[in-house]
Image: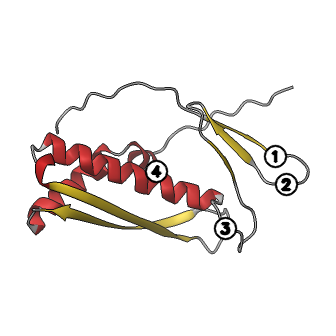
Amino acid sequence: MNQFRVKKRPTGAVVTLARLGHPDVVTATGGALKVVTGASEPGFNPLDLLYSSLAACLALSARIAASSMGLLDRFERVTVHVSGQKADEEPSRIIRFDIRIAIEGDFDGQTRAAIAHAAEDICTVSNTLKGDAEFVMSIAD
């Protein structure tokens, strides 16, 4: 597999939630959003953010893959749709991610598949979700 140069940038997020209202998310890079809690409220809920993170990472990784394969000049656009299935039993979790990736450009099916599979290998989010990342929690005083 090709090695990619990754530019380091701050990562992380802080969420604040008061007794009433919505969670506020602020990222280490200055991003901010409110998380919705009602099923009919427009906006991002926590699962939307999870699916969005995976979709965005795969899309960016597809462009990186096309570039590393020397195909970026033929790459027009990628669209990634991610949904999933929640488990019926406890603990609450996603048991399957359904991913549809549409790569537009002057490519045959085999090349599209190669870009898509390379994107999955490159994507930090997909690699993390498939792995066994350790959770280290500390409780503030």
Of tags 3 and 1, the one toward the viewer is 3
In which quarter of the view is residue 98 placed?
Answer: bottom left
Which one is earlier in the sequence, the residue at label 3 or at label 2?
2
Which one is earlier in the sequence, the residue at label 1 or at label 4?
1
Q: Amino acid at mark 4?
A: Leu
> Where is mark 1, residue-wise?
17
Q: CA distance from mark 3 to mark 2?
A: 15 Å
Name the residue at 48% across, 51% down: 53
Outermost residue, right side? 19
Q: CA distance from mark 4 to mark 3?
A: 26 Å
134 horizontally vs 98: left or right = right
The N terminus - image quarter = top left
In the rendered image of this protein, does residue 7 appear above or below residue 64? above
Callout 4: helix, strand or loop?
A: helix
- Which residue is nearer to you in this view: 116 or 64? 64
> Where is mark 4, residue-wise?
129
Q: Are marks 1 and 2 in contact (CB under 8 Å)?
A: yes
Q: Position of residue 50 (x, y in %)?
A: 54, 55
Which one is earlier in the sequence, the residue at label 3 or at label 1?
1
Q: Amino acid at mark 1?
A: Leu
Q: Are marks 1 and 4 in contact (CB under 8 Å)?
A: no
> Where is mark 3, residue-wise?
42
Callout 1: helix, strand or loop?
A: loop
What crowding class fits label 3: few (fewer than 14 Cα within 10 Å), some (14-19), or many (20 or more)?
Answer: few
